[in-house]
Amino acid sequence: MEANTCTTTPQTPSPNLTTSEAAHFLNVQPATLEQWRWNGRGPKFCKIGRSCRYRLADLEAFLEERVFRSTTEAQAEV
């Protein structure tokens, strides 16, 4: 008798993420992204009507800009 296996494929995120989805991707609170938007410190975003959307490529670029080899290097960027 064959075992009943359930295979799931990873769900591909939409290229345009909501604030909540982008926050989850970055492992921060949605309020943090909202504050970064207000201060101009966060990742690039698109304004579509009254909604803000984040492109996955922009979130990845935001992370890539924050890759350091030491804490000294990171502090120099602040």
Image (tube, rainbow, N blue to C red):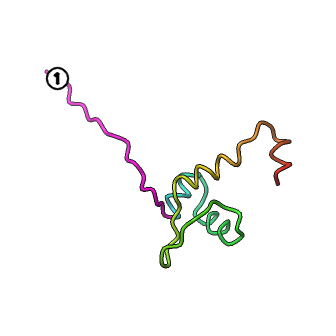
- Left/right of residue 53 with respect to residue 74 in the rendered view: left
Q: How would you classify the magenta stretch by its main secondary structure?
A: loop
Position of 64 relative to 50 (above/below):
above
Indicate the position of residue 47 as horizontal and vertical percent values.
53, 72
For disc 1, the neighbor class at 10 Å (few under 14, some 14 to 19, many from 20) is few
Q: Amino acid at mark 1?
A: Glu
In the image, residue 52 lies at what x, y percent? 53, 70
Looking at the image, how many numbered discs can be counted on the residues? 1
The residue pinned by badge 1 equals 2
**Could you tell me which quadrant the N terminus lies in?**
top left
19 vs 3, left or right, is right
Q: Residue furthest bottom?
A: 50
Give coordinates of residue 77: x percent, y percent: 82, 51
Rendered view: 58 above or below 8: below
Residue at 54% of width from left, 52% of height from top?
57
Quarter of the picture holding the C terminus? bottom right
In terms of secondary structure, where does tag 1 sit? Answer: loop
Q: Which residues are magenta?
A: 1-18
Residue at position x 42%, y 52% in the image: 13
Looking at the image, which residue is at 60% across and 60% down? Answer: 29
Would you place residue 9 above or below residue 33 in this image?
above
